[in-house]
């Protein structure tokens, strides 16, 4: 399920792979996660007992919230990766087929079976704008991580 980031300053949707690689890039470039806050509607105690909140869960789409300072640090760290990301499309030699879907700007790229992709290849070329946009979104403040539905 894609990750839908929602904030007063906008909404961004990323595939599972994009989101995972953005988080990894941020971490690899100095981001120290502060931990996420529970969703606004979180209920800690139910009839079954106390529910534990997983404060380092940046991945599931539960509506958990990243506070402004954490988001800003995440965005700053992702930008530190840009000098290491190729300006050319470093992934093109691993693509088996491209499919243009309606209402989607970039074609869906089907990779050759068994190939691996790292964040630097994935965001190379025109993918660099994803990092720049994500960093700008993070600089604007905190956000919630939900699903696309």
Image (tube, helix red, strand yellow):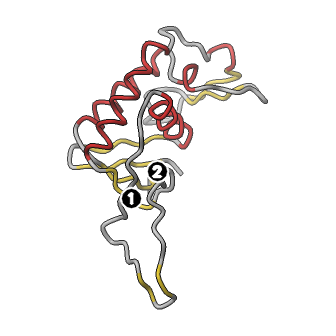
The mark tally for this picture is: 2
Residue at the extreme bottom of the image, as rendered: 47
Q: Label 2: which residue?
A: 58
Within 10 Å of the Cα at label 1, are there few (<14), some (14-19), or many (20+) other Cα atoms?
many
Q: Label 2 crowding class (10 Å Cα cut-off): few <14, some 14-19, many 20+? A: many
Which label belongs to residue 64? 1
Identity of the residue drawn at 21% across and 49% down: 8
Helix, strand or loop at disc 1?
strand
State whether residue 122 is above or below residue 1: above
Instruction: Say if mark 2 contacts mark 1, CB within 8 Å.
Output: yes
**Image quadrant occupied by the C terminus:** bottom left
92 w.r.t. 105: above or below: above
Answer with mark 2 or mark 1, whichever residue precedes in sequence: 2
Residue in the image at 34% along x and 50% along y: 66
* Residue 137 percent across, percent down from the top left: 29, 36
| Coordinates of residue 21 in the picture (x, y in percent) | 53, 34
Of 1 and 36, which appears nearest the observer? 36
Image quadrant assignment for residue 114: top right
State the SS at label 2. loop
Q: Residue at x 38, y 55 (%)?
A: 36
Q: Which mark is residue 13?
A: none
Q: CA distance from mark 2 to mark 1?
A: 8 Å
The residue lying toward the viewer, choosing from 136 and 98, is: 136
């Amino acid at each position: 399920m894609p990750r839908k980031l929602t904030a007063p300053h906008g909404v961004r949707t990323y595939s599972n792979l994009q989101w995972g690689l953005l988080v990894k890039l941020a971490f690899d470039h100095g981001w120290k996660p502060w931990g996420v806050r529970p969703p606004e509607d979180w209920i800690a105690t139910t009839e079954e007992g106390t529910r534990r909140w997983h404060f380092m869960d940046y991945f599931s789409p539960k509506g958990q919230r990243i506070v402004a300072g954490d988001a800003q640090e995440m965005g700053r760290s992702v930008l530190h990766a840009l000098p290491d990301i190729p300006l050319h499309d470093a992934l093109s030699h691993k693509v088996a087929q491209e499919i243009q879907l309606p209402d989607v700007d970039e074609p869906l790229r089907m990779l050759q079976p068994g190939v691996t992709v790292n964040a630097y290849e994935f965001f190379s070329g025109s993918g660099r704008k994803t990092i720049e946009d994500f960093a700008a979104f993070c600089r604007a403040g905190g956000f919630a991580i939900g699903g696309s539905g």
